[in-house]
């Protein structure tokens, strides 16, 4: 059995642990398994590049961050656009055949899964694995890489908090998450943030300023965990691209900077912002992610052995299982404003910037 | 009171919510959740994971129905569950964990429900109703040109028989078209000028319309989903050989990836055969028809009573259907009187048929001993053993392929 593995989209902790688990399982349990790494995600498949991997390649990568295969972003929208008479999808299918693959593991987020579904439709035997620090892949309770990112973001906010408390400032900490606010929600609660602003709950700027300047709160400083995709209630009806265009037109870059300026002007408090950025992706996976990645990788390899393709591994109710790619492609798992975690946070006084 | 009918199909769970005010029953809501049961099969059995998924989706649906104040809900299943070998295990799990009882609808009853739901189109001149399902197809003339033909093969069967990959290529699509034509010929389906309007029923047809609308900027603001013959043929060409066909399907109906192209091929063949110029995609189907019939007392089935928190009545089963059919005809209400004569092209599937090879079927295997097929127009009772198409090439992990 010829098996290809690729990692696509932004990197995160746990990718190597998954590669290792797939590799070791196949070496141990599938007679005659040949494993090929495909470099740079779908980019490598488009170019038809691959390299043979054997057991020793998997030995020492469990705790390594990033991906030993390399990765790249290949927008889903471009996959079926013809370039020089051939689309990227066609090239990938051709190369899949040329390589003689029997199975392709695609480790990636929501976009990677959409492309995986395309490949599956075109007849490639694909098995997906849910990687993203955003935790927004539909049909799985958790994705690998998320927990490590939560720990990094929480630790960062903890460190920022000491400075903010000393200087009695309001600090906005921008956390990754354009569509989904899971990372901001979890790290915000874990670090004791006063306010959490996520894309799923558009915030009211008056409510934010009122909360910051509320003298009843016996706290001389404020930590606001804000997702990069957080939205003003007044802008919620517009598309993301339209919001970005309008903001650029007004000379503002991000919602975080805009909010920091407004809070400073209206409340008179010294307000700063910090963007955690790529800190959240890098580094070694936490123990939880190492375990989860290993379990998911092993399970996915078992799916390949049993001949079940067109699916993606998932965690449901604490158990490792699978979903059909066609059931999850193009869908996102977002934070419900009524979910128990949000309700609990509100009960302990965390504001979400909404009026209610 | 609000009523709901939920339908488990091979690719989704769809629900209609209706409100009854006096004599009027109005559809007030529709919902659909993608559920590709095909991917959760272990041979001919729905896997443990598949049962879990089904139960989970049903539980969510039940909660939403309770939230919007639905009083009674009928859960029906068509071909998707008819063909699985662990049907009882599935229905027990569904009942045990959600309280919902599955009412099984067979092909003929499904066609009748479609017919009832789409009686509004009987005023169309020379109209024919076409329901394309995963495991069966029903073609039913409306008005004067009445007559029903039930085919025991569906879009999934065509896909499994002809497509090596998930999307058939041009040659495979051509073979598929030839096969479909031969089956239509064999069933003595009316030819040129028999019908001028084809009314398409079923979610796959709805998905085809969505793709058509995406490409042609058609809109259905006035409530009518219509397709032009020429533009539709262009769409078929694009679906067969276009570079962006997978993206189009994935964008519009990812759960229908296996059946979009077979459906397009079948519709094209029908349009050519009938010489029909007009295509209407109906958004009324088996659920609407079943609700009409069950509220009229012309159809049986257990329902979930939200006030009582339990199911009431006996589950409808295929075995019970012959009785209900007889009753239906015996009562002869207005709608039933207009019910066209049913002309079964095929009977229930048999194990022997599943082993048939691709290509022209052997005569002995193609005909039941009870109903020898004669040349020319078949008798009303003529029945043919199923010719469940066999997949070409390496078998995939599906119920059909694995059971062989």
Image: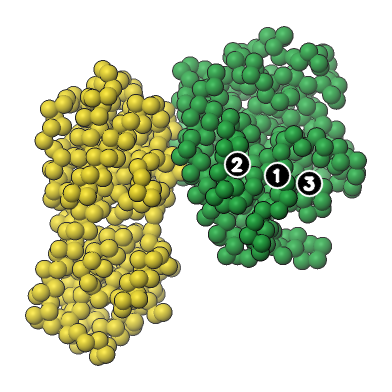
Nearer to the camera, A162 or B312: B312
Chain identity of mark 1: B
Rendering colour (chain B): green
- For the question of whether residue A114 can be seen, the reply is yes
The residue indicated by pointer 3 is: B299
Chain seen in yellow? A
Mark 1 or 3: in front is: 1
Q: Position of residue A80 (x, y in %)?
A: 39, 38
Chain identity of mark 2: B
The residue indicated by pointer 1 is: B315
The residue indicated by pointer 2 is: B91
Tell which circle, 1 or 3, labels the residue nearer the N-terminal end. 3
- Classify mark 2: helix, strand or loop: helix
Q: Give the residue displayed 26% in from the left and 47% down from the top.
A: A144
> How is this picture coloured?
by chain
The quarter of the picture where residue A244 lies is bottom left
- Classify mark 3: helix, strand or loop: loop
Tell which circle, 3 or 2, labels the residue nearer the N-terminal end. 2
Q: Is residue A172 above or below residue B252?
A: below
Q: Is residue A213 left or right of residue A87?
A: left
Tell which circle, 2 or 1, labels the residue nearer the N-terminal end. 2
Q: Are marks 3 and 2 in contact (CB under 8 Å)?
A: no
Q: CA distance from mark 1 to mark 3?
A: 11 Å
Chain identity of mark 3: B
Q: Position of residue A313 (x, y in %)?
A: 35, 40
């Amino acid at each position: 059995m010829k098996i290809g593995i690729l990692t696509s989209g932004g990197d995160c902790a746990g990718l190597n642990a998954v590669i290792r688990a797939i590799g070791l399982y196949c070496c141990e349990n599938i007679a005659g398994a040949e494993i090929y790494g495909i470099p740079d995600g779908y980019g490598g498949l488009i170019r038809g590049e691959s390299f043979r991997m054997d057991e020793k390649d998997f030995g020492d990568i469990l705790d390594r961050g990033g991906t030993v295969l390399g990765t790249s972003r290949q927008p889903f929208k471009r996959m079926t656009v013809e370039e020089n008479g051939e689309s990227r999808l066609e090239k990938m299918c051709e190369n899949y055949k040329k390589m003689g693959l029997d199975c392709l593991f695609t480790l990636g987020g929501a976009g990677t899964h959409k492309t995986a579904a395309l490949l599956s439709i075109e007849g490639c035997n694909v098995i997906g694995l849910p990687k993203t620090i955003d935790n927004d892949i539909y049909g799985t309770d958790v994705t690998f890489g998320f927990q490590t990112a939560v720990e990094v973001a929480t630790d960062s906010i903890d460190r920022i908090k000491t400075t903010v408390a000393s200087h009695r400032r309001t600090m906005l900490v921008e956390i990754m998450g354009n569509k989904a606010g899971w990372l901001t929600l979890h790290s915000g609660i874990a670090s004791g943030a006063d306010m959490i602003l996520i894309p799923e709950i558009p915030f009211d700027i008056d409510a934010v300023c009122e909360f910051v300047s509320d003298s009843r709160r016996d706290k001389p400083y404020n930590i606001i965990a804000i997702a990069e995709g957080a939205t003003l209630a007044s802008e919620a009806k517009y598309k993301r691209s339209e919001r970005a265009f309008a903001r650029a037109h007004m000379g503002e870059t991000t919602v975080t900077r805009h909010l920091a300026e407004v809070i400073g002007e209206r409340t008179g408090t010294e307000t700063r912002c910090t963007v955690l950025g790529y800190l959240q992706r890098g580094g070694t996976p936490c123990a939880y992610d190492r375990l989860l990645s290993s379990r998911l990788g092993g399970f996915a390899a078992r799916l390949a052995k049993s001949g079940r393709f067109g699916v993606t591994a998932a965690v449901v109710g604490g158990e490792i299982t699978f979903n059909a790619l066609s059931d999850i492609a193009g869908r996102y798992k977002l934070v419900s404003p009524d979910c128990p975690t949000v309700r609990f946070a509100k009960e302990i006084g965390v504001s979400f910037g909404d009026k209610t | 009171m609000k009523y709901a009918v939920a339908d488990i199909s091979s690719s989704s769970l769809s629900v209609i919510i209706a409100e009854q005010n006096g004599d009027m029953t109005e559809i007030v809501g529709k919902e659909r959740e993608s559920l590709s049961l095909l991917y959760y099969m272990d041979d001919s059995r729905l896997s443990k994971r598949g049962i879990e998924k089904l139960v989970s989706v049903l539980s969510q649906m039940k909660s939403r129905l309770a939230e919007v104040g639905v009083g009674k809900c009928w859960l029906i299943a068509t071909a998707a569950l008819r063909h699985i070998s662990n049907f009882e295990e599935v229905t027990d799990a569904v009942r045990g964990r959600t309280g919902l009882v599955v009412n099984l609808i067979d092909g003929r009853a499904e066609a009748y429900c479609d017919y009832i739901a789409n009686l509004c189109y009987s005023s169309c001149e020379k109209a024919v109703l076409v329901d394309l399902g995963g495991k069966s197809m029903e073609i039913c003339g409306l008005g004067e040109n009445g007559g029903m033909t039930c085919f025991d093969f569906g879009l999934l069967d065509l896909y499994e028989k002809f497509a090596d990959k998930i999307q058939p290529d041009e040659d495979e699509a051509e073979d598929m078209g030839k096969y479909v034509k031969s089956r239509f010929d064999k069933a003595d389906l009316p030819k040129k000028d028999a019908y001028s309007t084809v009314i398409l029923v079923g979610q796959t047809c709805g998905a085809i319309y969505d793709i058509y609308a995406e490409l042609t900027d058609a809109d259905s603001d006035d409530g009518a989903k219509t397709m032009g013959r020429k533009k539709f043929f262009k769409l078929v060409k694009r679906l067969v050989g276009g570079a962006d066909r997978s993206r189009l399907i994935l964008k519009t109906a990812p759960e229908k990836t296996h059946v979009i192209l077979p459906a397009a091929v079948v519709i094209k063949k029908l349009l050519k055969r009938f010489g029909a110029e007009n295509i209407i995609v109906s958004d009324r189907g088996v659920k609407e028809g079943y609700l009409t019939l069950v509220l009229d007392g012309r159809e049986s089935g257990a329902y979930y009573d939200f006030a009582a928190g339990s199911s009431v009545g006996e589950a409808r089963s295929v075995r019970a259907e012959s009785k209900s059919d007889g009753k239906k005809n015996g009562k002869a209400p207005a709608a039933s009187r207009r019910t066209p004569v049913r002309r079964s092209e095929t009977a229930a599937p048999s194990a022997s048929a599943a082993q048939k090879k691709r290509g022209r079927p052997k005569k002995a295997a193609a005909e039941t001993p009870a109903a020898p097929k004669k040349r020319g127009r078949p008798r009303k009772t003529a029945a043919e053993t199923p010719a469940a198409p066999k997949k070409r090439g390496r078998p995939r992990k599906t119920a059909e392929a694995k059971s062989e």
